[in-house]
Image: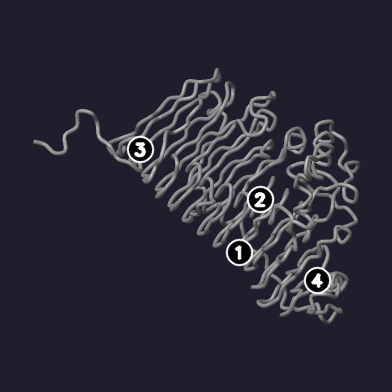
Amino acid sequence: MRHLIHRFVALTLSLGAFVAPMTSGATTPHAQRSTARVIGWGSVPAILSRIKAPKFPARDFNITSFGAAADGKSDSTEAIRKAIAACNAAGGGRVVVPVGVFLTGAIHLKSNVNLYVSEGATLKFSPDPEQYLPVVYTRFEGTECMNYSPLIYAFEQENIAITGGGTLDGSASEENWWAWTRRRGNDEALARSSVRKLLDYGERGVPVKDRIFGKGDYLRPNFIQPYRSRNILIEGVTIVNSPMWEIHPVLSSNITVRGVKINTHGPNNDGCDPESSRDVLIEDCLFDTGDDCIAIKSGRDNDGRRVNVPSENIIVRNSTMKDGHGGVVMGSECSGGIRNVFIENCHMDSPNLERALRFKSNARRGGFAENVFMRNVDVGRVKESILTIDFMYETGPTGPYKPIVRNVTLENVKSTSSPRVMWIASFPGAVIDNIAFIDCVFRGVETSEVVEASGSILFKNVKIEPVSKGRSLNSRPSWP
């Protein structure tokens, strides 16, 4: 049964804890909860101690010395490849992109290489799909395959970086990559048949080496993708016009994303999507995106369960989220699980930001998200809710894998305008448990809460102020 919790007066719960038990569903949430190891903010110092940005020798390899031209027209792909190879062979250093516009195709990083994009420099990536062949081992929306190379790619490398104050321009537009996702009159989008084929391969367990896409198919590449790599730094660059997801580390560890500005509003333009990765720090970044600002993932459906590697130990702090489907999101590709996510000291505000904290899954994805903590976050306007937990996403209850969200705490979160505080949509057998709001203030709430859950939702010292304040039928303006 769906419960609508109406808030027509300010609600202040300051003298203790209020627990709203939700009885829908036939699960045993306490048994589910007992299987999870609950951690908290005290775990953050240990996580941070493991996240160390790589260091590089003081050697520079200027791409113009290898034949690159700063005219925005000449193809610098081979020159950049040679500079990276020389830097790697010498034991590491910086591959320097100087001031100017350099046209390039796919860039493949190697160990001990820092791709340094100088302030005033632009790496402008070609929109020609041929420039991203041959195909590489990658993930497309949570399913492994052989597909177009990401624009910047690293496979089984260590000590790699993309730094500097310059710009990475993916050149995506409605005339090229983005057009693959658009309907053509009464015909479906070009990408739809390719996506169906990939999902079928994943469900049937076709070997990844035989899941060959690329030319003749329409699966867009991600912008930056370190795959099975470690000791990664992405710092200072600006990213625009991405084909789809911008920063997408997969099966990787010890990752720092710092001071990055992302402003790209195409389809599926997520900002930063750690997937099946651990020990990740995202800080001092700006996200202005066409999809989720940050989306933490761990594989999709049966293919995600085959790989079965969670995303864990992820810290997001001191960042700004503007446009996007969500500020920080878990899923929907979460079949391998997500745990230990810490979000603090962020600002989220835009009429085009839909939610602050979002969980999305369904009975095909399954998976779990647990130990997720948000504190000291200022939210201006959001379009849907402060917290969304949506198990009705896409195929909803159709499938045998019941998702779990548990041990989620929002503390000292303040907002100024939202339709509601919570949108929680679930189905029998799924688990939503131990959700807590502590020391929060939500102002300008416009309508009823939507809650359908199993388990408990706790409010402690929480104020919810509707747009139009009222009073109880028996209240008096003053007493005596």
Mark 4 or mark 1: whose residue is earlier in sequence: 4
Q: Amino acid at mark 1?
A: Lys
Q: Are marks 1 and 2 in contact (CB under 8 Å)?
A: no
Say above or below: 377 vs 204. Answer: below
Q: Amino acid at mark 4?
A: Leu
Q: Position of residue 297 (x, y in %)?
A: 66, 44
Marks 3/4: CA distance? 55 Å
Query: Which label sits in the foreground, 3 or 1?
Result: 1
Left or right of residue 396: residue 105: right
Mark 3 or mark 1: whose residue is earlier in sequence: 1
Please give the label number shown on residue 261: 1
Say above or below: 177 vs 21. Answer: below
Q: Residues within 10 Å of mark 3 (few under 14, many from 20)?
A: some
Q: Amino acid at mark 2?
A: Asp
Mark 3 or mark 2: whose residue is earlier in sequence: 2
Query: Which label sits in the foreground, 1 or 2?
Result: 1
Residue at (56%, 59%) from the top-left corner? Answer: 283
Q: Observer-nearest residue: 88 or 145?
A: 145
Q: Residues within 10 Å of mark 1 (few under 14, many from 20)?
A: many
Q: Which residue is disc 2 drawn over?
A: 273
Picture quadrant where residue 336 is located: top right
